[in-house]
Image (cartoon, rainbow, N blue to C red):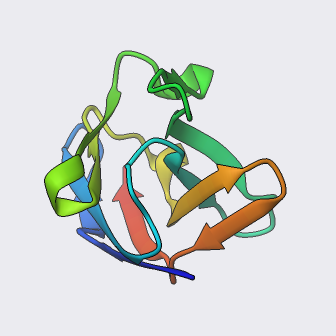
Amino acid sequence: QVHLVESGGGFLQAGGSLRLSCVASGSISSINGMGWHRQAPGKQRELVARITSGGVTIYKDSAKGRFTISGDNAKNTVYLQMNSLKPEDTAVYYCNYRPYQNEDYWGQGTQVTVSK
């Protein structure tokens, strides 16, 4: 079992920056397989960024160049640095851990609200 706890969300104006953190505990040996999704009101949850099982970082197109996912294996922590935030980035951001294709763990989510 894996437990994920996110932090770092908030309310800010467009153009600002935030860094989200996700700390994992339990049966996890590497941050590979961890990532961030988000869900805006009335929309489906979508992938924002992930560190694949092979250690490769992937991003949603609209996040490329603005968001950076990174991690610290020693702390079992993954970060999402978000710069140049836009109102359309407003959503609940969820940490996800996917050690295998059919196994997912989710955090409780952290709200990010970007005003115009």
Measured as percent of width and height from the top left, residue 47 is found at 65, 43
Query: What residue is shown at x 72% (from left), y 51% (from top)?
Result: 100
Give the mark count: 0
**Where in the figure is residue 103, as x and y percent of width and height?**
76, 63
* x 48%, y 28%: residue: 63
State left or right for residue 95 relative to residue 102. Answer: left
x and y percentages locating residue 16 in the rendered image:
19, 43
5 w.r.t. 56: above or below? below
Along the line of sight, the residue nearer the viewer: 47 or 10: 47
Q: Observer-nearest residue: 11 or 65?
A: 65
**Quadrant where the image shows the N terminus:** bottom right
Residue 113 picture location, percent across and down: 40, 65
Q: Nearer the viewer, residue 73 or 8?
A: 73
Image quadrant where residue 65 sits? top left
> Horizontally, is 86 left or right of 101 in the view?
left
Q: What residue appears at the point 49 percent right and 76 percent down from the top-left corner?
A: 109
Q: Residue furthest top?
A: 65
The answer to whether residue 32 is above or below residue 56 is below
Q: Which picture quadrant has residue 115?
A: bottom left
Q: Residue at x 54, y 45 (%)?
A: 33
